[in-house]
Image (cartoon, helix red, strand yellow):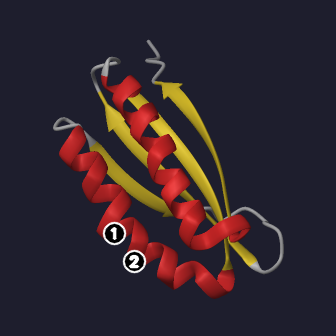
């Protein structure tokens, strides 16, 4: 299994609006583009910069070829978020490959 993780740092005053954007735009777009995808959203519980909340959006796929599609459209959607939220929404992404233990 592969996980494409994007972590979002959102200013607290915009968190509800951002969650609506994720629910209405980001997640449905990814589900439409990649049919075999599981998308989960988590609040990061580690200490973060005061006045902000971090969220992790994890998209799980079994076919590594889907990662290219996710990466391409993730960048487009992140740019759209920047138009709405500006520098009050910071992101970084990483790709994880599941390690099976014996």
Point out the residue furthest to the right here: 50
| Disc number for residue 20 | 2
Specify few, some or many for label 1: CA neighbours under 10 Å numbering under 14, 14-19, or 20 or more.
few
Point out the residue furthest to the bottom here: 13
Q: Position of residue 80 (x, y in %)?
A: 49, 58
Count of labels shown? 2
Give the residue at x 49% y 82%. 17
Residue 97 visible within the image = yes
Q: Position of residue 1 (x, y in %)?
A: 35, 25
State the SS at label 2.
helix
| Disc number for residue 33 | none
Q: Nearer the viewer, residue 58 or 30?
A: 30
Q: Is residue 66 above or below residue 82?
A: above
Asked if residue 96 lies left or right of residue 7, the reply is: left
Q: Is residue 97 above or below residue 60?
A: above
Specify few, some or many for label 2: CA neighbours under 10 Å numbering under 14, 14-19, or 20 or more.
few
Asked if marks 1 and 2 touch (Cβ < 8 Å), the reply is: yes
Residue, disc 1: 23
Give the residue at x 48% y 19%. 99
Give the residue at x 73% y 62%. 46
Q: Is residue 63 above or below residue 93?
A: above
Q: Position of residue 13 (x, y in %)?
A: 65, 87
Kindly report the distance in space between the C-alpha atoms of the residues bearing marks 1 and 2.
Answer: 5 Å
Residue 1 visible within the image = no
Give the residue at x 37% y 54%. 40
């Amino acid at each position: 299994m592969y996980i494409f993780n994007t972590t979002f740092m959102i200013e607290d005053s915009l968190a509800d609006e951002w969650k609506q954007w994720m629910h209405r735009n980001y997640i449905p777009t990814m589900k439409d583009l990649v049919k075999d995808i599981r998308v989960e959203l988590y609040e990061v519980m580690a200490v973060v910069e005061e006045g902000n909340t971090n969220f992790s959006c994890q998209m799980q796929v079994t076919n590594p070829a889907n990662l290219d599609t996710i990466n391409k459209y993730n960048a487009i959607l992140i740019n759209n978020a920047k138009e709405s939220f500006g520098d009050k929404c910071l992101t970084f992404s990483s790709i994880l490959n599941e390690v099976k233990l014996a």
